[in-house]
Image (spheres, grey):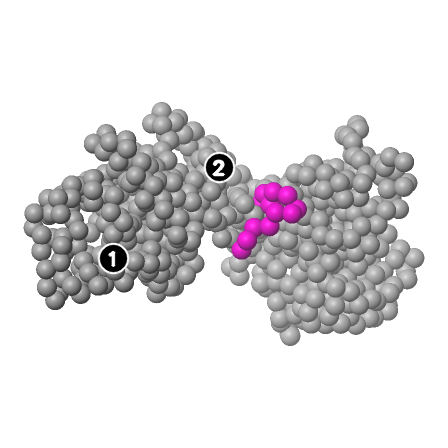
Amino acid sequence: MQTNKYENFSAIDFLKDDDFLKWQLFRDEAGNAYWAEIMAHYPELTVSIRKAIDLYKKCVKWNDFKLPPYEVIERLVLLQDSIRKEKQRRYRMHIYWWASTAAACVTLLLSLVFAFNDYQIKPQSEAGSLLQNIASHEIDEVTLIVDNSAMILSNNSQISYMASGAIIVNTDNNTGDPLIREHILQTQQSKLIVPKGRRSSIILSDNSRIWLNSGTTLVYPSSFKGDKREIYVDGEIYIEVEKDSLRPFLVKTSKLDIEVLGTKFNVSAYSSDMEQMVTLVEGSIAITNSGKKNILQPNQLLTLSNNGDYKINDVSVMDYICWRYGWIQAHTTSLKELAKRLSRYYDKEIICDPHVNMLKCSGKLVLFDDLEKVLYTISKNMNINYRYKDNKIELFSEK
Amino acid sequence: MSAFTPEQEKLFCKFKEGDEDAFSFFYQFFINDLYAYGLGLGAKSEWVKDIIQDVFLKVYFKEKNYESLAHFKYFLLKSVKNKLYDFYKSKAFTSSVEISGGRQNFIVTTTILDDIIGSEDKLIIQQKIDKLLSKLTARQKEAIYLRFIQELDYLQIADILNMTVPAVRKLIFRSLKRLKEDQRLLLIYLFLLYTA
């Protein structure tokens, strides 16, 4: 029999033994077998080994980080406080919905009484008035208007319309359950207003998904009736249209009608902008502008200028849809254009001196939550400076 | 083998029914496990603390359909990791720093407690353990940590690490193998024992 390498080992000696430590680390089959064998052969070691195992369990700690007990209590109290606030918020929302639903019912009844004979929904004109009656610059949070009542939503909220007609709103930070609103009136046009500095997304009742960029207003029906699906946009959206060959999908802007069956494309049609742009990612779309019809292929961009001229270019579509992922792709983009986009995204006025206006930049710009970081990146890369002045941001160069 | 006492299991039933005291108990019961795991994932203490609050706030308002106390613990650990990852994503610190596909670096800091072990011995033991651990990859450390320190089962670890169960077993097995450059010695030893 070979010599016992563990002869007279104490518990501490075992704790210093590599094989013992590995066994404790992994508690693997081979280790179990090996140490069982040792204990069977050398029963006198059993006590020390058992003691060593006990010591290891008690004393060897991985990442033994603990909060001091008083802090645990402190944080528990804070948590209970947040829970209380959240409960109150939910309770208020609940009351608010009931009240607004009741109000909407009364309104509908009255309108039926007064306009029963020649009542007819005229989507286009109604949408036009909806687009106008609340100017989006007066609103500073994402707002969903359903049945003549407004719901204020947090930034990056995701809104879904279920086939049943219920609306579910998921907030960005995922705290708590989604808000749910049921039994909405199906006849009404709904309106989603995303002010500057905010973003949102929505799933329509036909399962089409739309991402709304800052400063965008979208008008759509709670459920699509008839043989067409129609929505109205002022601003920028990226849309993935659910295929439905029986019901074409129509996106209307102040100047363009875009007709599709099932595709993915981006529309930038801010009424305040000189140009309106449509970029096609997948499928095919027909764009009509004052009677002229154009068919767009994937990776093509249609630009319509204010004077009615339009052109079609082949482009890299990612440049036009990357805002959805929180970054901007610039290809010899002028800083003027970039400043405009940033100003919309962050809801801060940005002005450039004439020299800066002329500068062109290329590359990927990550849109951090903190505008300061973005300005810092730009100023370092473009070798310009920025300062805050009367709540505006000035980009300027030193000669 | 359950790591929880019958009293805790009983309290867990109350917790599932929405009992406030039971909620407070489990908050205090798990906070340090979550805190330690978060720090192990390399996050700053303040972040981890905020994330834990978020996770519990969500737990409070959600339906509590956890199968068991062990399942609840796994859910908490996983939530902390996911939230931490979301947090990293939202704060993509500078334009030059990219997050590498969600792989967080898992760090293990060992400590030897207790006064029974003399300080000299403590130092030697700690050095030995650290030397063993230094041969493992971050992922192997995380798997071992979740298995033997947090006592999750393989299915749960596989889910947290985004791997299959056999892959996790292999990962742990491989780390064992890595430590055994002197494995042959052990085999010879076993062989001798059997033939003796």
Residue B99 on the magenta segment: yes
Which residue is at a point 60% across and 50% down the rendered structure image?
B98
User: Mark 2 or mark 1, which is nearer to you?
Assistant: 1
In what element is the residue under mark 1? loop
Which residue is at a point 74% across and 49% down the rendered structure image?
A131
Drawn side of residue A370 relative to residue A302, left or right: left
Which residue is at a point 45% across and 32% down the rendered structure image?
A82
In what element is the residue under mark 2? loop
Please state the horizontal and vertical placement of residue B134, each as a whole percent of the image: 40, 48
**Residue topped by disc 1:** A28
Parent chain of label 2: B
Looking at the rendered structure, the kind of residue marked 1 is Asp
Drawn side of residue A330 relative to residue A18, left or right: right
Q: Magenta residues, as a range?
A: B90-101
Please state the horizontal and vertical placement of residue A274, each as a whole percent of the image: 86, 52
Which residue is at a point 76% across and 47% down the rendered structure image?
A341
Please state the horizontal and vertical placement of residue A50, each as a whole percent of the image: 14, 45
Q: Nearer the viewer, residue A317 or B120?
A: B120
Q: Which mark is residue B65?
A: none
Q: Nearer the viewer, residue B118 or A269?
A: B118
Q: Nearer the viewer, residue A202 or A330?
A: A330
Name the outermost residue toward the right. A307
Name the outermost residue toward the left. A43
Rate crowding at label 1 as few (under 14), some (14 to 19) or many (20 or more) other CA atoms within 10 Å: some
Please state the horizontal and vertical placement of residue A91, each as a whole percent of the image: 47, 37
**Residue topped by disc 2:** B44
The quarter of the rendered structure image containing the C terminus of chain A is top right
Q: Nearer the viewer, residue A134 or B151?
A: B151
The quarter of the rendered structure image containing the N terminus of chain A is bottom left
Rate crowding at label 2 as few (under 14), some (14 to 19) or many (20 or more) other CA atoms within 10 Å: few
Looking at the rendered structure, the kind of residue marked 2 is Lys
Q: CA distance from mark 2 to mark 1?
A: 33 Å
